[in-house]
């Protein structure tokens, strides 16, 4: 099933981008697509940070609250 | 001449140049194309198109010879070489006329003459009437390429031919030597061999069709040999002794020299870019061997100066030239086009059997460190192939084991030049093996083998 | 018989059934297929494959008649109908043998006999030796379909034929009436017309090839008429008066009855599912007209009972049957396959010129409320088409203006049955117009028209 974005809308991504994102633990809803009609393509996920890393980076901020 | 100042001037009206000019005009640019010889370039006049017209005649001839296989019959099956060649020239002429019409329709100015670049932003054109000077913000060099001539193997038009001579032959060769088994060499070999010439192909690399996947080249070779061609790999023509109506070729193979006699030799040992006499180096453009060095957007480094198509280097293919033409036109109009990735450009060879491929060969994929999944499927397992009486061929696909990326697809057999686009579309859309597995290829078609080959890479083929 | 208890039993060894059984076996299931007549079903024996073999003969015959166009010559071009038919039967036989081999290789048990379903999980097979009872957790009904017979138009094998008779004709028709211009009707019309039969096609709908896009059907019709066919649309055969060697057809058109004489009639007015005698309704399976009602996973509602292929309804196509076969096998093995979307199944017709399409027609797209972009491109603008001597045809693409989705693609002309897969791959990968525009189609190929048609939808075509 195609992942949904934060707004509940379908995320458009190429199959290869999905595969690589899954492999790297990247949440596609946070990736900006540079392909046709904003489609997320391989290059977008290859330059994106894994979700785990992104979450870790945010952790101190939420701790501080 | 209505005007001398343009948004874009294109030098050379081949598939790179005329397409760039038309696209520029579509985008509202004032465009001009300068051509010294023929609209449509090598492609329409002495390349892609007339060769395919010749090959169609030999294909139909071959089918006629096989009439009995299809329950048909005919007496005295023959060809008239002049008529075959005239048809080919006629097709080229028709296409050239089409380009003329398209340029006019799109309001692209056409200047017939030889161009050079006297200064940045300037184009000088030597026409019948003298030299004209034109200016433009964007200048696109699309002057193409010509046959490479090796010392001692130079064409003379009588005994030794380039593709130009081979397209308008002075005679039907009886004993033909083709030097070089790239697309151009093998297409002529296929054409003349089918029409009855005793044909020998000499290839310096260790396989015919050197850029193709090993398995595909080996399969094609077997078919060529079955058709009566003699194929010499890892062999080199060192010398041609020309006499009256006769050439003695000195062919080095396995450290020994073999002497063989031919009445005709076709030299197809590559091409060189038309970089001379343009004033490129004077403007600061870098030239590597005979090709202009550009970035991925075809920019030369000199502001407003682009180089596209054959002159900008490999792959030397018309569709690469045309896509680069569209890209530079869009750049010039302020757009943000995507660069053309060489790895998504398919190569087609229209010999019998046809060969087509895109992406990496198995060897290249391994060389680049991929762990791969490889699938193959033979034509003999395909209903349409058998129904067509074209059961010789194979499809091979290569996937990245980790991501499922389709790294390469390789085909040999009937109609594969028309089939390969499905894989090209797949690669463009970043397909994985799964998408191709889920695709419903229509039955009965040759294209079902494209599906089976993917399935085969994962041990799931049905008809094998 | 080695066993009577299976993981999966498939009834019917057509492209639905045998593929389901092979896939099941690949997945480790113990599988059996029951077939009453011929491995490969209608498709290999009396459908897709033998028709394409016949059509190949007529295609080559037609090329031979055009020899002069290609600079070639031959005397006394002819055909031997028996040889043409024998070739076709031989191809079918070869393919049937292939299926036998594949089933064996995959260790699928084959039981020859007529099956029925005496109870849930049970299959009774009437064989030469009596009735056998088998059990299975999963039972797949893949019994296919047969020609529909309209009252008064029933086939007799002599004057009035179904596709079975037309595939193994008792004579070469001189004056032929084909009733129905769907794929089957028009393919036989094309075959016999090319071999010289004076052919009339009667279609009750307002266009030949009624499911195709209007523009495509109109284009095809023009070609058929050029080839000497008589095409009657919005016309209905009301009555056939059969006499010795002669049929008088009463054809209603425009409110009037026209009487015409023929020596042969082919009735191709649709098919009906083989639902009878299986005990389906007794088990609680719903039947709508002559088709089993299923959900998108081909489940009948009765646990462990599936129906696939022609018996499960439109589109009546072999590739649909096969993909459903793979799907149910994967379901039975506990997998999570994707259902087959009817809208991504291409339809191909192998008449001359060929016709192929996928997705929505222009009319359907509008009907469904889409705002659309439509592009067309003619074969005459394509270099390969002209080089092949096949310059008649067109490509039409339909996009959703809002999302850029490729809603439908429609083609008529040479090799389009092989081309359509590129669009099918595109749709599978959810392409938009932009991806297709960025795709580099190789030159010179017919497939370049697929690119141009997309460009044309957005006013960007180059060669038009
Ligand atoms: C026999 C043969 C078969 C081929 N088959 C295929 C095939 O099947 N598929 C394929 O993709 N490719 C094929 N090619 C290659 C293809 O022809 C080229 O890749 C293509 O033509 C390159 O296009 P271009 O626009 O870069 O250059 P060209 O087509 O070479 O056009 C360059 C033009 O520039 C003009 N010109 C040069 N210098 C000047 C000047 N100073 N002033 C004005 N005009 C100038 C030339 O006259 C020429 O018309 C084939 C080539 C050959 C020789
Ligand atoms: C002339 C013609 C041309 C065609 N051309 C094409 C084409 O080009 N492309 C395309 O996609 N489709 C084509 N079709 C349609 C295609 O043949 C069918 O869609 C396809 O065969 C359906 O497959 P199936 O497995 O559902 O059924 P079938 O192929 O009909 O197979 C069903 C099998 O079940 C067996 N069977 C039936 N009842 C029982 C029983 N009670 N017990 C045991 N066995 C039983 C039958 O003997 C048969 O072998 C064509 C059809 C015809 C008639």
Image (cartoon, coloured by chain):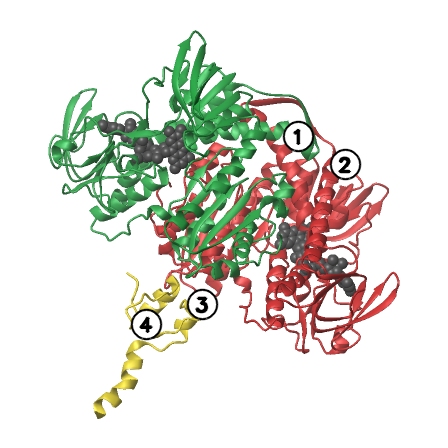
Chain colours: A yellow, B red, C green
- B338 w.r.t. C439: above or below: below
Give the image location of residue B71, x and y in percent. 53, 23
Do the residues bearing badges 2 and 3 touch, measured as CB atoms within 8 Å?
no
Residues at marks 1 and 4, common chain?
A: no
Q: Pick the residue in front: C215 or B173.
A: C215
Q: Quadrant of ligand 1?
A: bottom right
Q: Which mark is residue A35?
A: 3
- Spatial CA distance of label 1 from label 4 is 60 Å
Q: Which mark is residue B82?
A: 2
- Spatial CA distance of label 4 from label 3 is 15 Å
In the rendered image, which quarter contains the N terminus of chain B?
bottom right
Secondary structure under badge 3?
A: loop
Q: Which mark is residue C67?
A: 1
Ligand 1 neighbours mark 1 (CB distance < 8 Å): no
- Spatial CA distance of label 3 from label 1 is 49 Å
Secondary structure under badge 4?
A: helix
**Residue depicted at 18% across the width and 23% down the height:** C126
Q: Is residue B202 visible?
A: no
Q: Residues within 10 Å of mark 2 (few under 14, many from 20)?
A: some
- Spatial CA distance of label 1 from label 2 is 14 Å
- C39 w.r.t. B260: above or below: above
Which residue is identified by label 4? A29
Mark nearer the viewer, 2 or 3:
3
């Amino acid at each position: 099933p195609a992942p949904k974005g934060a707004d509940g809308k379908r995320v458009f991504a190429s199959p290869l981008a999905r595969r690589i994102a899954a492999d790297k633990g990247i949440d596609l809803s946070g990736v900006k697509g540079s392909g046709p009609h904003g489609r997320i393509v391989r290059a977008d996920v290859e330059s994106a940070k894994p979700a785990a890393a992104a979450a870790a980076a945010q952790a101190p901020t939420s701790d501080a609250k | 001449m209505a005007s001398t100042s343009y948004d874009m001037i294109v030098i050379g009206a081949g598939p790179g140049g005329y397409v760039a000019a038309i696209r520029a005009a579509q985008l509202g640019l004032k465009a001009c194309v300068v051509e010294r010889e023929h609209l449509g370039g090598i492609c329409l006049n002495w390349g892609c198109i007339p060769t395919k017209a010749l090959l169609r005649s030999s294909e139909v001839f071959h089918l006629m010879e096989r009439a009995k296989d299809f329950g048909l019959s005919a007496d005295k099956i023959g060809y008239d070489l002049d008529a075959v060649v005239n048809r080919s020239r006629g097709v080229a002429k028709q296409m050239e006329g089409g380009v003329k019409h398209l340029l006019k329709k799109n309001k692209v100015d056409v200047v017939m003459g030889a161009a050079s670049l006297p200064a940045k932003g300037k184009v000088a054109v030597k026409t019948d009437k003298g030299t004209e000077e034109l200016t433009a913000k964007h200048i696109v060099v699309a002057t193409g390429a010509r046959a490479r001539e090796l010392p001692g193997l130079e064409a003379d038009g009588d005994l030794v031919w380039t593709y130009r001579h081979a397209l308008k032959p002075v005679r039907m060769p009886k004993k033909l030597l083709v030097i070089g088994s790239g697309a151009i060499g093998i297409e002529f070999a296929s054409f003349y061999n089918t029409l009855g010439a005793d044909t020998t192909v000499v290839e310096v690399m260790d396989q015919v069709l050197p850029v193709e996947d090993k398995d595909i080249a080996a399969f094609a070779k077997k078919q060529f040999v079955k058709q009566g061609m003699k194929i010499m790999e890892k062999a080199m023509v060192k010398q041609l002794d020309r006499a009256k109506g006769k050439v003695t070729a000195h062919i080095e193979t396995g450290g020994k020299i073999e002497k063989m006699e031919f009445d005709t030799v076709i030299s197809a040992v590559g091409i060189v870019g038309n970089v001379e006499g343009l004033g490129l180096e004077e403007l600061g453009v870098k030239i590597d061997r005979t090709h202009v060095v550009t970035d991925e957007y075809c920019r030369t480094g000199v502001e407003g100066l682009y180089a596209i198509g054959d002159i900008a280097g490999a792959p030397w293919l018309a569709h690469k030239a045309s896509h680069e033409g569209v890209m530079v036109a869009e750049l010039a109009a302020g757009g943000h086009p995507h660069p053309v990735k060489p790895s998504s450009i398919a190569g087609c060879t229209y010999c019998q059997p046809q060969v087509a491929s895109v992406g990496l060969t198995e060897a290249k994929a391994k060389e680049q460190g991929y762990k791969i999944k490889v699938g193959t499927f033979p034509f003999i397992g395909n209903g349409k192939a058998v129904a067509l009486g074209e059961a010789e061929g194979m499809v091979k696909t290569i996937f990245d084991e980790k991501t499922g990326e389709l790294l390469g697809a390789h085909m040999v057999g009937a109609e594969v030049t028309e089939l390969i686009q499905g894989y090209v579309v797949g690669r463009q859309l970043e397909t994985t093996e799964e998408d191709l597995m889920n695709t419903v290829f229509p039955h009965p078609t040759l294209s079902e083998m494209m599906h089976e080959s993917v399935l085969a890479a994962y041990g799931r083929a049905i008809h094998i």
